[in-house]
Amino acid sequence: MESKLPTPSYALRTVKWFKENVGKDLYFIVGEDALSYIETWHRYEDLIGETRIAVYPRYCGKPFEEHARKVLGKAYERILWLNLPIIQLSATQVRERARRGLPLTGMVPHLIEREVRRFFKEAGSGGL
């Protein structure tokens, strides 16, 4: 679906597309490390206004929580910390491995590995 949206790919565009085409109550899932630089995201205030942010843990002790509280202010209340096992895997790693033709075993379900690889090779550096 993102491949059909204008580039560059922005989280806000994706969320708006899903709200218009799928449903109104959305959660945008990000890895915990994304909170360390969320203020650099395209129109991050609007993104948080459009959806709730669900944060997947990557580190013990939530090291980026204080930064997110400071940057987001009152909007921090829209952050949901997921209580899930810590897994050291990022979408950036998956994208880079797919673009370089490296194995994705254990990173994405086997059933979609070919599609993931194709999408990110076609997207190249101009995509996600």
Image (cartoon, helix red, strand yellow):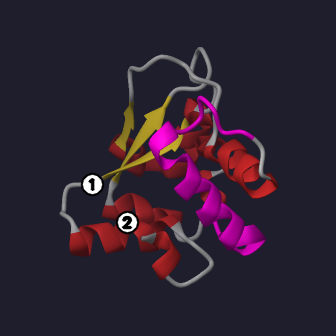
The question of residue 5 being in magenta is answered with no
Give the answer, above or below, for where 106 lies relative to 12.
above
Residue 83 or 98: which is nearer the viewer?
Answer: 98
Q: Quadrant of residue 60?
A: top right
Q: Which residues are magenta?
A: 103-128
Residue picked out by circle 1: 26
Residue name at image x 21 percent, y 66 percent: 22
Query: Which amino acid lies under the numbered mark 2 shown in the image of this protein?
Result: Val
Residue name at image x 75 percent, y 47 percent: 97
Residue picked out by circle 2: 15
Pointer 1: residues within 10 angstroms few (<14), some, or many (20+)? Answer: some
The question of residue 121 being in magenta is answered with yes
- Measured as percent of width and height from the top left, residue 31 is found at 55, 38
Pointer 2: residues within 10 angstroms few (<14), some, or many (20+)? Answer: many
Query: Which amino acid lies under the numbered mark 1 shown in the image of this protein?
Result: Leu
Left or right: 115 in relation to 77: right
Q: Which quadrant of the figure contains the N terminus?
A: bottom left
Give the answer, above or below, for where 38 lies relative to 3.
above
Do callouts 1 and 2 mark residues in contact (Cβ within 8 Å)? yes
